[in-house]
C-alpha cells in the first residue's frame, strides 16, 4: 500500500510517498514560495538525484498537480499512476481538545479544523486549504488528519491549565495544548523499540531541538507535560521565538516602546530566541561557530539555550518521579554534539552521564550516547514526523 503525506505551510507544500508494505520512502519533495515570485519545485526520488524546477505555482491545487507530475513522470517517477496511492495523510497543526488521535477526514472534521484556526491562524487555515485541494484531485481515497496537538491530549488538567480565571478556559479554551506531538510520539515509540522495553514501563524526556524547540515528559507512553503552550511560543529558547517570559514584559514594552500588538507578536515570534540574543543568526551552526571564535554574545546565547533545557529536564524528572531515558532529536538535537554535552554536563546527580566518544561519533545516527554506568539512558533518535503520519494513516485505512 502506498501512502502520500502532505504538509502545507503558509507558502509551501512538502510531500513524501511511502510504501507501507516495505516501510520505505519512495520519493519526497517540496514546492516552495507558492503564489510568490521565485517559486521552486523540488522532487527527490529515493536513491536518485534531486530535481529542481522553477515554475509558476499559485495555489495548493496547482502544487499538488506538479507533485503528481513528478511522481508519475516516465523518466523520474516512482509510480505508474496515482491510482497506486491508497490514502493521504495530512499534517494538521491544531486539533484543539476535540482530537486526541488521527482521524479520517469528513465534513465535521473539516469544520473543526477551521474552528481551531482561531488557535493556530498561521497553520490550520493552510492545512485545510491543502486538504481541500487534495480532496478535489483525489476524490476517491481516504484523507486522514494527523494533529500535532493530539499526542499531548493526555496531559492532565493540573498541567495544562494556566493560573488564569477558569472562565477563560471554559469560554475561550485557553490552556496548554503543546505541539510537535507527532515527533514526540514517533521518538517515544522508536525508543521503546530500540531499547526492547515496553513503552509503558519507561519515564522519558524527549527534546525536539530544531528551529522550533519543545520538550515532553512521557510516562507510561503518554505525554504528561510539554513545554509549548496555547501557541508554539512558550517553553524553550528557539531559533526566533523567545520561549518562557514574564507576561509582564509585554505590557512593559507596549508602554515603554509604544509597541502595538502586531509588533509585539513579531518581536516575540520572529526577532527573539537565538537570533535576538546573539544578534547573529537563528541558526545554531552560526552561533556555535561564532562562540568558538570568541564572540561573547554568541556564547551567552548558547548558554541561555542550554540552561533552559536543563531546567526543563529537572522539572520533568521531578513530575515523573524519576527518569529512565533522555532523548535528543531534530536538527540541533541530532547534529550538535557540543549542545548535548553541555546539557548533560554535571547531571550525574540525576543519573545522567554521557560517553564523550559515543556522543561525538555521529554514527550510527540512531544510538545510545550515555556511558554504561549512567542510570539514565541517553539517546539520539532522528525524528521522522512524515513516517509517523504515514503510519497513523495506514493504521486507520487498512481496516
Ligand atoms: P525545523 O524545526 O525547521 O525542521 P531543523 O530540525 O532542521 O528545523 O533544525 C534546524 C536547526 O538545526 C538549526 O539551528 C541548525 O543549526 C541545526 N542543524 C541542522 N542540521 C545541522 C547539522 N548538520 N549540524 C549542525 N546543526 C544542524
Image (cartoon, grey):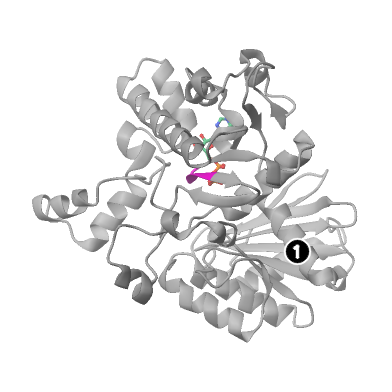
Rendered position, 307 above or below 398:
above
Where, by quadrant of the figure, is residue 305 drawn? Answer: top left
Give the overall secondary structure of the magenta segment. strand
Q: Position of residue 132 (x, y in %)?
A: 62, 79
Residue 76 versus residue 375: which sits nearer the camera? 375
Q: Position of residue 262 (x, y in %)?
A: 26, 62
Q: Residue at x 67, y 24 (%)?
A: 362
Q: Which residue is mark 1?
A: 4
Rendered position, 91 above or below 24:
below
Task: Tell me, yes or no, if residue 159 can be seen here.
Answer: yes
Q: Residue furthest bottom?
A: 107
Rendered position, 203 above or below 172:
above
Residue stretch in magenta: 211-216
Q: Position of residue 18 (x, y in %)?
A: 80, 57
Quadrant in the picture for the N terminus: bottom right
Residue 315 appears left or right of 135: left
> Tag 1's secondary structure?
strand
Amino acid at each position: 500500500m502506498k501512502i502520500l503525506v502532505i504538509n502545507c505551510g503558509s507558502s509551501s507544500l512538502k510531500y513524501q510517498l511511502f510504501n507501507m508494505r516495505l516501510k520505505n520512502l519512495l520519493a519526497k519533495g517540496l514546492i516552495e514560495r507558492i503564489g510568490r515570485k521565485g517559486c521552486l519545485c523540488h522532487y527527490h526520488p529515493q536513491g536518485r538525484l534531486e530535481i529542481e524546477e522553477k515554475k509558476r505555482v499559485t495555489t495548493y491545487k496547482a502544487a499538488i498537480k506538479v507533485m503528481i507530475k513528478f511522481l508519475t513522470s516516465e523518466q523520474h517517477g516512482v509510480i505508474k499512476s496515482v491510482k497506486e496511492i491508497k490514502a493521504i495523510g495530512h499534517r494538521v497543526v491544531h486539533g484543539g481538545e476535540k482530537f486526541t488521535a488521527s482521524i479520517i477526514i469528513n465534513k465535521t472534521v473539516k469544520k473543526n479544523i477551521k474552528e481551531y484556526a482561531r488557535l493556530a491562524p498561521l497553520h490550520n487555515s493552510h492545512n485545510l486549504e491543502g486538504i481541500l485541494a487534495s480532496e478535489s484531485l483525489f476524490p476517491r481515497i481516504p484523507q486522514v488528519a494527523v494533529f500535532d496537538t493530539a499526542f499531548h491530549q493526555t496531559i492532565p488538567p493540573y498541567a495544562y491549565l494556566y493560573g488564569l480565571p477558569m472562565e477563560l478556559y471554559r469560554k475561550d479554551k485557553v490552556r496548554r495544548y503543546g505541539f510537535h506531538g507527532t515527533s514526540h510520539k514517533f521518538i517515544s515509540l522508536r525508543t521503546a523499540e530500540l531499547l526492547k522495553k515496553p513503552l509503558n514501563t519507561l519515564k522519558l524526556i524527549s527534546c525536539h531541538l530544531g528551529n522550533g524547540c519543545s520538550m515532553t515528559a512521557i510516562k507510561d507512553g503518554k505525554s504528561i507535560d510539554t513545554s509549548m503552550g496555547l501557541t508554539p511560543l512558550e517553553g524553550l529558547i528557539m531559533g526566533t521565538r523567545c520561549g518562557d517570559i514574564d507576561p509582564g514584559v509585554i505590557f512593559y514594552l507596549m508602554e515603554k516602546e509604544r509597541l502595538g500588538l502586531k509588533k509585539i507578536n513579531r518581536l516575540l515570534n520572529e526577532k527573539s530566541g537565538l537570533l535576538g540574543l546573539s544578534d547573529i543568526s537563528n541558526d545554531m551552526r552560526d552561533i556555535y561557530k561564532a562562540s568558538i571564535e570568541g564572540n561573547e554574545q554568541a556564547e551567552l546565547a548558547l548558554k541561555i539555550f542550554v540552561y533552559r533545557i536543563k531546567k526543563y529536564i529537572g522539572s520533568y524528572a521531578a513530575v515523573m518521579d524519576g527518569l529512565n531515558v533522555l532523548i535528543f532529536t531534530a536538527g540541533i538535537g541530532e547534529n550538535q554534539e557540543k549542545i548535548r554535552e553541555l546539557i548533560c554536563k554535571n547531571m550525574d546527580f540525576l543519573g545522567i552521564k554521557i560517553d564523550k566518544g559515543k556522543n561525538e561519533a555521529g554514527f550510527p545516527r540512531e544510538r545510545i550516547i550515555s556511558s554504561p554506568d549512567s542510570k539514565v539512558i541517553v539517546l539520539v533518535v532522528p525524528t521522522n514526523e512524515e513516517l509517523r503520519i504515514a503510519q497513523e494513516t495506514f493504521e486507520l485505512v487498512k481496516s
